[in-house]
Amino acid sequence: MRARSTLPAELPPLRLLLGWDHLTGHHTPDLLLWLFAHGVMVLFTPLAGSWLNLAEALLRILIRRPLAGQHPQSSA
């Protein structure tokens, strides 16, 4: 059974989107709280099915844009 974590009321600005798989160590509450506290949002890859295709498309966009030199000018 997994332990539930409660996020703090205030989080730092988002600095990084991290695409991660489902290894057991990636789901520990201490690790996830540390990542959130440092502005890292974890995007876990789906295990199977049509969601996997959607995740691959999203990760392809997230990888292609920074490599092309695109940088957001505002949070909007």
Image (cartoon, rainbow, N blue to C red):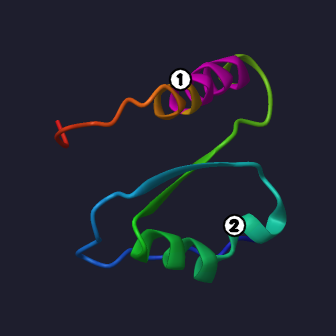
Residue drawn 29% across the image and 71% down it: 11
| Residue 44 screen position, x and y as percent | 64, 46
Determine the secondary structure under disc 1: helix
Which region of the structure is painted magenta?
52-62
**Disc number lying in front (2 or 1):** 1
Residue 56 forms part of the magenta stretch: yes
Q: Which residue is mark 2?
A: 27
Q: Residue 61's mark?
A: 1
In the rendered image, the quadrant that contains the C terminus is top left
Side (left or right) of 44 relative to 5: right
Magenta stretch: dominant secondary structure: helix
Residue drawn 68% across the image and 75% down it: 28
* Outermost residue to the bottom: 30
> Local crowd at mark 2 within 10 Å, few (<14), some, or many (≥20)?
some
Q: CA distance from mark 2 to mark 1?
A: 25 Å
Determine the secondary structure under disc 2: helix
Which quadrant of the figure has residue 7? bottom left
Front residue of this view, candidates 13 and 68:
68
Identify the mark nearer the N-term, 2 or 1: 2
Side (left or right) of 54 relative to 9: right
Residue drawn 62% across the image and 77% down it: 31
Q: Amino acid at mark 2?
A: His
- Above/below status of 32 relative to 18: below
In the rendered image, the quadrant that contains the N terminus is bottom right
